[in-house]
Image: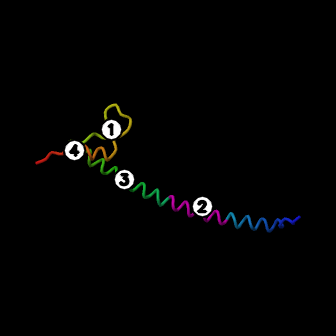
Amino acid sequence: MTKAPALSTQLKAANEKITALEKQLEGVTKTKDLYFGYYQDAKDVVEEVHTLLDTLSNTVKRRGEGMYTDYSLMVRLASYFANKETK
């Protein structure tokens, strides 16, 4: 049978593995934060367009009567262009 490595060797290997995993976790956390920032920016832009559509006439309201969810931005934009007055 082969002899198991000494406890100090096992501890050193475990510490190296922990350090590597902590670095990997830090990288993943930074990536998550970066993408969450992109998501927040896009969400803010969508909210701005919804606010703009709220001010325009001939647009479907954000939430229909008796509805529990909002209309999507695309539905609201389509309703605006479909009902747009031509001059």
Q: Which mark is residue 63?
A: 1
Q: Which residue is mark 3?
A: 44
* Mark 2 crowd level (few <14, some 14–19, many ≥20, 10 Å Cα): few
Q: Are marks 3 and 1 in contact (CB under 8 Å)?
A: no
Q: Amino acid at mark 2?
A: Leu
Q: Earlier in the sequence, mark 1 or mark 2?
A: 2
Q: Nearer the viewer, mark 2 or mark 4?
A: 4
Q: CA distance from mark 3 to mark 2?
A: 28 Å
Boundaries of the magenta span: 19-32
Q: Position of residue 18 (x, y in %)?
A: 68, 63
Q: Nearer the viewer, residue 14 or 55?
A: 14
Residue 5 lies left or right of residue 44; in this view the side is: right
Q: Position of residue 26 (x, y in %)?
A: 58, 63
Residue 27 lies left or right of residue 35; in this view the side is: right
Q: Amino acid at mark 3?
A: Asp
Q: Nearer the viewer, mark 4 or mark 1?
A: 4
